[in-house]
Image (tube, helix red, strand yellow):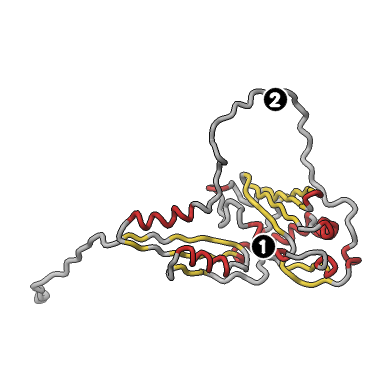
């Protein structure tokens, strides 16, 4: 017969109490030049608990390689104090209305026009890039600004230079095939649409299907496509020195 184990005369009893409230949140951003941004985020929160997560690749081949996070940890005895922090950050979020949300009756259009086929083209009469002289390697963000966003499953991406003297090079450089190459590992044979806005020195692309089923049904990290522009601008490209002499960001 086996003797029963000794039964202790005391027990451990855990007790719990609401001592404080906490609310960590993270902010994601694509592009290598995020150090200053995260320092600003830390200063805005007046906290030593703001931590940068990840190190972006120098010349990323995917948006994953270009993305880092800033994690801000908030803790206080009062829940309202914790909630005040994300409310402040919300002031910097995109607003979906301006001034008023009152409905405006549109009525019926007075005239109708036939729906034409969507335009999609590379630049007309491109210049020979080799005639622009020696080039230097630099990030596209050093010479061009951009904006991107979602439209269902697609990403709209507009990119422009700041000088008329750079336009001929830029429109000749930013072809549909160039855009596909800039997608890197994120390209899955997506259809790419391209048009130009010469008076804005801008080229606009639509990448069809890159967000899958779109927004809440997208498997992409950047499901709204807002960081896509910074990812593309983070790519290293060959830029003629003569173009840089005209203007640089």
Residue 242 is labelled as none
Q: Are marks 2 and 1 in contact (CB under 8 Å)?
A: no
Q: Nearest the camera: 43 or 10? A: 43
Q: Secondary structure at mark 2?
A: loop
Q: Residue 220 falls in which quadrant of the image? A: bottom right
- State the separation of the CA atoms marked 2 and 1: 45 Å
From the viewer's perspective, tell me whether residue 154 is left or right of residue 239: left
Q: Is residue 152 above or below residue 83?
A: above
Residue under the image location 65 percent in, 47 percent down = 154
Residue under the image location 70 percent in, 64 percent down = 141
Residue 150: percent from the left, percent from the top?
62, 48
Specify the quadrant that holds the C terminus.
Answer: bottom right
* Sequence order check, earlier mark of 2 and 1: 2
Q: Residue furthest front?
A: 99
Q: Is residue 174 above or below residue 214?
A: below
| Residue 196 appears in view | no
Disc 2: CA contacts within 10 A as few (<14), some (14-19) or many (>=20): few
Residue under the image location 76 percent in, 58 percent down = 162
Specify the quadrant that holds the N terminus.
Answer: bottom left
Residue 223: percent from the left, percent from the top?
57, 52
Residue 188: percent from the left, percent from the top?
68, 56
Mark 2 sits on what residue? 109
Q: Secondary structure at mark 1?
A: helix
Mark 1 sits on what residue? 185
Q: Residue 37 falls in which quadrant of the image? A: bottom right
């Amino acid at each position: 017969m086996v003797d029963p184990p000794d039964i202790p005369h005391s027990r451990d009893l855990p007790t719990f109490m609401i001592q404080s409230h906490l609310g960590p949140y993270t902010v994601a951003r694509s592009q290598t030049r995020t150090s200053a941004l995260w320092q600003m985020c830390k200063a805005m929160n007046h906290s030593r608990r703001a931590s940068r997560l990840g190190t972006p690749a120098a010349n990323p081949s995917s948006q994953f390689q270009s993305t880092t996070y800033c994690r801000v940890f908030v803790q206080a005895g009062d829940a309202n104090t914790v909630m005040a922090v994300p409310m402040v950050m919300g002031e910097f979020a995109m607003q979906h209305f301006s001034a008023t949300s009152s409905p405006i009756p549109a009525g019926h259009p007075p005239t109708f026009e036939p729906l034409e086929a969507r335009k999609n083209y590379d630049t007309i009469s491109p210049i020979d890039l080799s005639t622009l002289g020696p080039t230097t390697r630099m990030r596209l963000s050093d010479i061009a600004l951009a904006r991107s966003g979602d439209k269902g499953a697609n990403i709209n991406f507009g990119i422009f230079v700041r000088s008329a003297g750079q336009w001929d090079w830029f429109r000749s450089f930013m072809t549909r095939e160039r855009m596909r190459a800039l997608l890197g590992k994120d390209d899955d044979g997506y259809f790419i649409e391209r048009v130009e806005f010469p008076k804005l020195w801008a080229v606009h692309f639509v990448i069809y299907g890159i967000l899958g089923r779109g927004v809440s049904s997208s498997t992409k990290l950047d499901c709204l496509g807002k960081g896509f522009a910074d990812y593309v601008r983070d790519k290293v490209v060959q830029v003629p020195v003569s173009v840089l002499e005209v203007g640089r960001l």
